[in-house]
Image: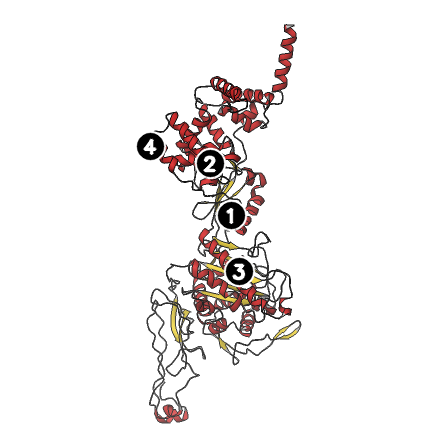
Amino acid sequence: MSAVLLAGGGWWWHSLSRDLPDDNAIHHIRESAQSTIIFDAHDQPASTLSTEERINVPLSQVSPYFLQALLAVEDQRFYSHGAIDPPRIAAAAIANLLRRRAAQGASTLTQQLARTSFLTPQKTLRRKLQEIILASRIERQYTKGQILELYINKVYFGSGLWGIEAASLGYFGRHASALSLAEAATLAGLIQSPSTYAPTSDPAKAIRRRSTVLKMMLESGVIDRPTYVSANREPLKLEDALSRRQPHGPYFFEAIRKSLVEHYGSDAVYKGGLRVYSTLDPKMQAIAEAAVSSSLKTLEEERAKAPGKERDTNEPLQAALIAIDPKTGYVRALVGGRSFEESRFDRALQAYRQPGSAFKPFVYAAALEQGYTGATIIDHLDRPLPTLQGAWLPDDGHVKGNSIDVRNALRISSNRAAIQVMDSIGIGRVVSYAQAFGLDRLPAVPSLALGSGEVTLASLTSAYAAFANGGFVRKPTLVRHIDYGDGEGLETWHDSPTRAIQETTAFLMSDMLADVVNAGTGSQARALGFRLPAAGKTGTTNNYNDAWFIGYTPSLVVGVWVGFDTPHTIMRNGFAASVAVPLWAKFMAEATQGDKPDWFRVPESIVAAEICPASGRLATENCEEHRRQYFISGTQPVDYCDVHQPGFFRRIFGLVAAKPVESSPLEVAPPATTEDVVPPVKEEVRTKEPEAPPKKRGFWSRIFGRSSGK
């Protein structure tokens, strides 16, 4: 009989143990899925990627208040018992018998750890015995400190939060090491029944449970009465720092997620507990999203007033914005469309569209490096260019006459001037320079000068950043570095900048593009209240399908685009000046609030001179208009304007000789909206002295054009 009982007991014990994890599995109990945390530019948690919200931390990074509260409410004899606590089991059995229900539990922290790690929550005698077996194995392999650390990182706190660090960030917006006594008691009270005591669903019940935990801490001697009273009075203040649906930056975080999965795989991203340190400026991101939303609303109200033919599309109008630090390439804000919930397609990073006139600065940058200057006169604007389809001459309603200087051609966005310049220096050279800027989907055709290639908003904005970064191009970067959960470095971004143009060329381009903002196609930004020194360029494509504006200060370059996913007229006369510039100005006015009115340092090899725009030569007092322009030393004009001559009687009687316009020192001044004011610079530059004006001629030489000089 005893043999039968022994055999039956052995079989029963074997059946209990056969499906349990072996010692090797218990050895790897630490290996649990952890959340990947994405931090913002200030190293604050901004978003998470996970199958379950979990962030492992060592005991040293957990508030002592929480450990004390946990042991007081869950396992007061944790350090003195083994896998089970017999006195507690007896007390729980008596209480349950008296109340005729399961009023108290008797599981130790080790038992709870075994259940959480390996078993189902099913309440049966078989499962309870298996729990005890596993708890005994855990106690043999780990110290009490290790068991406590495993427990606090595996226990469930409700709302999808696993482990004390995720719970601290998810409920109170702070790390577990910074929990107050009241917050620690609140979290410790959740473990018994997370759904019942969740502070997010029933704050009053959570506070009552917190009071119970605090009372148990008082009774166990962990805290004194004054501390108990103070913590009991502390208001419940919730803050979620780990929400999966962030209020701002969904396109930004989605771009990071896709890149991480591509490089490291899904398991590492969703279970590996990576720490991803991004470049996002949360304040700037919020401003960007508000500006896009407000601008789209305004444009849609204007479209609603248009004739039906212009509104012949069921697609919603879209807009995108990207803000980049030109010195580092760090993306500070990113908006990929009007609604991430409606469409995850990122129009800032993924959409290739024609940039229109926003491409022209790269034509002129290439020309400056081939000897052109801002004062160079572009002639023969009415001359068609030969193409495979025949002679071609684009429309140009901006220029009166047959010539214009480079500076004003860029300011008013002359189409004919742009194609003549590109024809002069060669299409291949423009393509080569554009590729150096990071723009690579470009056709080698005459219309390239007007933006017939395709670019993304990110690549175009990054290319403009070279003008603000001394000619160096940096790739747009969303992540600074990535660490493993234990702090070991995984990858750090070391982008090597490449030079697209010389520093002097970058400065000259910024100086000319400042005219676009002050008195050109981008001047609406000034009318809308943006006052900092800035440069930029508009772009509008055929049929008003796309509206662009890329503008920058020394510390921030921002690109915006407005249009439909399927190219369609935005509105009648929907030039970028009225469609894209207001969005840019709205963002910049708030994002740069408080910034100093800095401008670019003048390179040593740059000189300045007063120039007549009609002749492109040194201005005299007879020139109707003139302005100070910058030149690379050796390229500045050395002769005087021959377009504006003294009047007949002046020439006859020599009452007034032609005199050069005097140059005044450069001064730091606020930007203006008039055409003849340049952006401020912070230091004087020495100009190369021009040749002296011709000596005053005698009477007969003035009549017959003979010179009395050498």
Which residue in the rendered view is the most extreme toward the front? 99
Question: Residue at label 2?
Answer: 206
Residues at marks 1 and 3 touching, judged by CB atoms closer than 8 Å:
no
Considering depth in this image, is 502 or 18 the residue closer to the camera?
A: 18
Task: Tell me the crowding category of disc 4: few under 14, some 14 to 19, or many 20 or more residues within 10 angstroms, Cα based.
Answer: few
Which of the two labelled residues, at mark 2 and mark 3, occupies the earlier sequence position? 2
Camera-near label (1 vs 2) is 2
One can see residue 249 in this view: yes
Q: Is residue 703 left or right of residue 415?
A: left
Question: Residue at label 4?
Answer: 226
Residue kind at label 2, given as amino acid type: Ala
Question: Residue at label 1?
Answer: 246
**Disc 1, SS:** loop
Gap in angstroms between the C-alphas marked 4 and 3: 63 Å
Task: Tell me the crowding category of disc 3: few under 14, some 14 to 19, or many 20 or more residues within 10 angstroms, Cα based.
Answer: many
Which of the two labelled residues, at mark 2 and mark 4, occupies the earlier sequence position? 2
Residues at marks 2 and 3 touching, judged by CB atoms closer than 8 Å:
no
Which of the two labelled residues, at mark 1 and mark 2, occupies the earlier sequence position? 2
Q: Is residue 236 left or right of residue 1?
A: left
Question: Residue at label 3?
Answer: 460
**Disc 2, SS:** helix
Residue kind at label 4, given as amino acid type: Pro
Q: Is residue 408 left or right of residue 660?
A: right
Considering depth in this image, is 559 or 375 the residue closer to the camera?
A: 559
**Residue, x 44% and y 26% (percent of image)?**
145
Gap in angstroms between the C-alphas marked 1 and 3: 28 Å
Residue kind at label 1, given as amino acid type: Gln
Gap in angstroms between the C-alphas marked 2 and 4: 21 Å
Q: Position of residue 283 (x, y in %)?
A: 44, 53
Gap in angstroms between the C-alphas marked 2 and 3: 52 Å
